[in-house]
Image: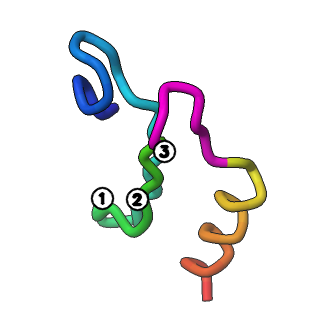
Amino acid sequence: MVYGLLEPNRAAPSTFILDKNGIITWKYIGATISDRTGPYSITRELQAIQT
């Protein structure tokens, strides 16, 4: 969660993918309060990690 980036006292929409060691390998942080990543982007990134 990214708190206070876009508006005070509000979390920005965000998605993080971590590898098996807990390292963030991909992140998406919305530019607006309604900007969210889609399932296809997440699936593509997960498939890239597996290769």
As drawn, the label of residue 13 is none
Closer to the observer: label 3 or label 2?
Answer: 3
Seen at 46% across and 57% down, the residue is 17
Seen at 55% across and 78% down, the residue is 49
Where does label 1 land, which residue?
A: 22
Circles 3 and 2, Cβ within 8 Å, touching? The answer is: no
Seen at 29% across and 34% down, the residue is 2
Three-letter amino acid code at the position of disc 1: Gly
Magenta residues, start to end: 31-37
Circles 1 and 2, Cβ within 8 Å, touching? The answer is: yes
Where is the C terminus found, in terms of image quarters? bottom right
Q: Secondary structure at mark 3?
A: strand
Q: Secondary structure at mark 2?
A: strand
The residues tagged by marks 1 and 2 sit, at their Cα atoms, a distance apart of 5 Å
Circles 1 and 3, Cβ within 8 Å, touching? The answer is: no
x, y percent for residue 47: 68, 75
Seen at 42% across and 57% down, the residue is 27
